[in-house]
Image: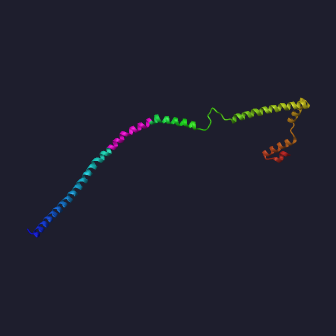
Amino acid sequence: MSLTTQKYRAQAQASAGLDRTRQAATQAAELAKNARATAAQGVQGARDWAVPRVGQGIYQARGWAAPRIDQAGHVVGETVAPRVSEILVTTAQRVDPSPPLAKRPLWPRLVAAGVVLAAAGGAAAAILRGRSARTSGGTLMAEEETAQAVTEPEPAAAEERAMSDGDATGNAKKASR
């Protein structure tokens, strides 16, 4: 066989192989399209089947968990919370800078001591005055002067009293006449 004949045969075979490859590729493309559509339908079917079941499972899980969470909340409120509250109150009492109720402030005792000292000083002054009046002119003379001073008001003091009474009524000039 001649070379040219072999060449033509090889070209024909290659061309036939190329045609078969093209046909196979076309068939594969059609099969791929069909497979994609079939897979999409399968995924859609699986989704349609799973969504209600997953939603139902979540609903059931929430229904199961809710009473247990509620019970845990009550247990914590009844057991742990009172203890925590007690600890907080005790800590607040320890931290509080104000003095305890047993210790009273110092100022009322100082005021009481001052009142007692003032009363004692007044009594001592009265005793000393009484002694000085007895030594200067007798007890009788001191008592008469004291009684006279109480019964007779001084003229200036009486005038001032009348003016203040007049000021209260709005007639200051009438009161002084």
41 w.r.t. 96: above or below? below
Rendered location of residue 57, percent (x, y): 32, 43
93 with respect to 146 (left or right): left
39 with respect to 134 (left or right): left
Tell me what residue is drawn at x 22 percent, y 57 percent.
Answer: 32
Query: Does 67 lie within the magenta span?
Result: yes
Quadrant of res 30: bottom left
Q: Nearer the viewer, residue 98 or 108?
A: 98
Tell me what residue is drawn at x 86 percent, y 30 percent.
Answer: 131
**Magenta: predominant secondary structure element?**
helix
Magenta-drawn segment: 57-75
Query: Does 2 lie within the magenta span?
Result: no
21 with respect to 91 (left or right): left
Please name the colour scheme applied to the rendered image.
Answer: rainbow
Q: Nearer the viewer, residue 39 or 8?
A: 8
Give the quadrant of the N terminus: bottom left
Tell me what residue is drawn at x 13 percent, y 66 percent.
Answer: 10
Rendered location of residue 128, percent (x, y): 84, 31
